[in-house]
Image: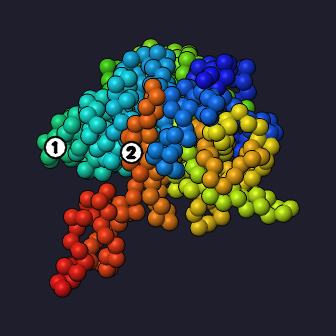
Amino acid sequence: MSPVSPALPPVDARPDSPADSPADSRLDSGLGSPAGAPVEPGLLPLTAEIRPEGLAVGGVLLEQVARQHGTPLFVYDEEHLRSRCREAVAAFGPGNVAYAAKAFLCTAMARLVADEGLLLDVASGGELRTALYAGVEPDRIVLHGNNKDDAELRTAMTAGLHHIVVDSFDELERIERLHHVEGLPPARIRLRVAPGVAAGAHEAIRTGGHDSKFGFGLADGAAAAAVRRAAASSAVRLEGVHAHVGSQVLDPAELADGAATVARFAVGSAAGIGVGGAVTGLTVGGGLGAAYVGGQQAPSFAVWAERVRAAVRGAGWTGRVGVEPGRSIAARAGLTLYRVGTVKRIPDVRTYVSVDGGMSDNLRPALYGARYEAFLPRRPEAPRPQRARLVGKHCESGDVIIDDAALPDDLRVGDLLATPVTGAYGYAMASNYNKLPRPAVVFVRDGRARLVVRRETEYDLLRLDVAGEGPQRSAPDPAAPDLATSEPATAQRGA
Ligand code: LLP
């Protein structure tokens, strides 16, 4: 067995300064592997290795994992995840990195990032519940959200989170009410600022502009007013400010720009608003992009940290700087395995290759025009001269995974096919469209495949349907005990 290529770069060793790699952050940038070339090793997880029988990750053959756990399947290289966590902590310092759980979260992932010493950034009650269930210490959790409800804030304040990132005056009021009326302890908070700097690969994932649902505007004075108000409130302990400019940003200059703007505000609020001691924390968000297709390059954590540090120092900020990477931790660590079901050749038009998943496990192409690559794990180094549209099994033509995929010539029905770099916002945005059960998730490491999220069954899909609304025509599934315990329809009707 041999590594994918002796030159397989460490995760972060790609050319990374914008000076040597003109970063192109547009999703439809026209980049991609040269015609017919095999998939680039830089798109595969860190421990990927080529064996005579095919590609192995984490010491396990992908064919074997697929046989054992079925398809579609999310496979994560645990070593890759861990090494990304370590690189981020090495670049920004212990206590300064919170993993943005929205990119990919399950109990095992929450545990992994906590073990690696990262904080966990959650953006809903459900993510918070998962983190607490996984045993993450509450004071290692940060809560986000532009419309947190009473229940989410109540859980956060009662548990005593590391801090809550407050997004609006309405939220401040809710926290004050929970403190004064329900007697909940004061919340440690940072204020989310809309810095007027929007970056990112698609309109939908740019968050930091002035015209944004997120945060207190800098330009209209809302941010300054929020600092004054929070500093005077007994319901909160104002500890810092926060900004996040967008996601899938490949140019570190854009991330540095956002950081400088919020740092200038933090320094200015400390001095000008007379709350000098209060604003001690600065979070500059996540947003660092990942390379999805050949020819794309993502900056390293080290470069991101260097650029951000220089930017905030230039703005007069001397304190710590926190970040919240999601995609850059999880994206390249994960890949999706599908089984090819049909190949349809339309003369003079195109070929359609259909797999057993689709937009329900990877919404990003349909939602953002995001681009991916595909390869056959049995022949990862094969040239890919064939062009085809890689599609899923959903009942709509928009169910496209790769519009114009480069594929090996000998691809055939029954083949296992992999799309790399699906570790972020793939499973996280998965749905049950067309009542497809969501895939299983497996972590591979040291020759072992560990199931961390089981595959949904068709009976799981009936879990929430209220019994008695129709005849039960099939026997309860032993894998879905919740259905087995619900009353049979006949009993409900009083028969
Ligand atoms: N912090 C905040 C406040 C955020 O809003 C986000 C992402 C992050 C951190 C993590 O950003 P990352 O490092 O992953 O870029 N579903 C979209 C991505 C939406 C990201 C929104 N916020 C996608 O599939 O591209």
Which of these two is toward me, 205 or 489? 489
Residue 20 on image: x %, y %: 73, 20
Q: Is residue 61 left or right of residue 131?
A: right
Q: How is the image coloured?
A: rainbow
Q: In the image, what residue occupies the spot 60% across and 47% down?
A: 416
Q: Is residue 458 left or right of residue 335?
A: left
Q: Which label was assigned to residue 206?
A: none
Q: Most extreme residue toward the bottom, as rendered?
A: 495
The residue furthest right is 348
Which quadrant of the rendered structure holds the C terminus?
A: bottom left
Give residue 274's quadrant in the image: top left
One can see residue 289 in this view:
no
Q: Amino acid at mark 2?
A: Val
**Residue 434 percent across, percent down from the top left:** 50, 66
Q: Residues within 10 Å of mark 1 (few under 14, many from 20)?
A: some
**Quarter in which the N terminus is drawn:** top right
Q: Earlier in the sequence, mark 1 or mark 2?
A: 1
Q: Which residue is mark 2?
A: 453
- x 25%, y 60%: residue: 482
Residue 81 horizontal/vertical position (percent): 47, 28
- Residue at label 1? 180
Distance from the alpha carbon under mark 1 to that under mark 2: 41 Å
Q: Is residue 456 visible?
A: yes
